[in-house]
Amino acid sequence: MNNLVSIEIENNSELGAVVSSRTVAEELGKRQDVVLRDLDNILKSHSTDLGSEIIQHEYTNNRGRKYREYLLTKDGFTLYMFNIQGHNDFKLAYINKFNEMENQIQNRLPGSYKEAVAQLLETLENNEQLQLENNMNKQKIAEYEPKASYLDSVLQNKSLVTVGQIAKDYGMSAQALNKLLHDLKVQYKQSGQWLLYSNIHGEGYTHSSTKEIEHKDGSTSVRMNTKWTQKGRLFIYELLKENDVLPIIEQ
């Protein structure tokens, strides 16, 4: 390759890799108006629309005056060079540079806007799932921490109850009790699952297990199954009583 060949290709955000007809004229030792005329003739002589390969454009010179030019994609540049003789080193240098820039762009960016959005959504979903699993693990770890108080030993009972069973004691639905516990800052909802706030999830109020759910599309997600211990049931009783909510038997 001729070492005197100067490669000047720009990466246009809308058009991709292009080279100006002014650069082509300068490298070939031609006048700009001659190159413009040649490109005009190519556009006129082809029945197909080449407007996306040989693109009309304007530039502003140092004096602020505007002049016309063409921006050539790799296909437009190749078509122009095939219409003139010689300059093989120049042709090869530019085609290689076009290929190099295209590879760089493809390796750096997703193939399309749709793919970019899909990639972003997948990343967000993965991050949300990781955060959910982390919070669930924190709750499970806290639940299994050893307890030392007398009350804990008295209330050591393997009988677990669901929030629905507790809700029946108060004549309400599981949904209503969950919402009430949320309003009282006991739990919060993340990705459709109720989790205890960090200030109480180590108090032994719940016992949670997780299971993997397989969906129709083949993907999987983790779901937490939380039940309340007898200590947790007593906690709910005391909390609701402070807020004037009594079980049916005491009403």
Image (spheres, rainbow, N blue to C red):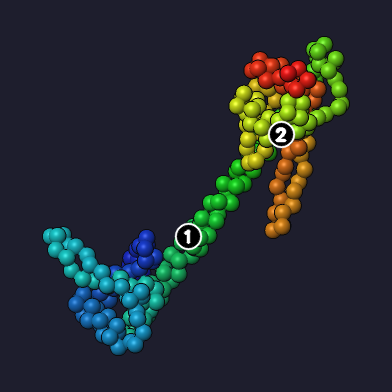
Binning the other alpha carbons within 10 Å of mark 1 as few (below 14), some (14 to 19) or many (20 upward) gives: few
Residue 79: percent from left, percent from top = 36, 81
- Left or right of 143 in this view: 35: left
Examine the rendering and report whether any part of residue 207 can be seen: no
Structural distance between the alpha carbons of marks 1 and 2: 43 Å
Residue 141: percent from left, percent from top = 74, 29
Residue 14: percent from left, percent from top = 36, 63
Q: Is residue 8 above or below residue 89?
A: above
Examine the rendering and report whether any part of residue 180 can be seen: yes
Q: Is residue 211 above or below residue 183?
A: below
> 219 or 41, which is in the foreground?
219
The tag on residue 174 is 2
Which residue appears farthest toward the front when viewing the image?
A: 251
Element on which disc 2 rests? helix
The part of the image, by quadrant, that contains residue 151 is top right
Give the amino acid at mark 1: Tyr
Q: Quadrant of the C terminus?
A: top right
> 15 or 241, which is in the foreground?
241
Camera-side mark, 1 or 2: 2
Residue 245: percent from left, percent from top = 67, 20
Residue in view at x 17 percent, y 65 percent:
66
Point out the tag, 1 or 2, that comes first from the N-terminus: 1
Which residue appears farthest toward the top when viewing the image?
A: 150
The tag on residue 113 is 1
Q: Quadrant of the N terminus?
A: bottom left
Residue in view at x 24 percent, y 78 percent:
35
Q: Are marks 1 and 2 in contact (CB under 8 Å)?
A: no
- Left or right of 18 in this view: 115: right
Give the amino acid at mark 2: Ala
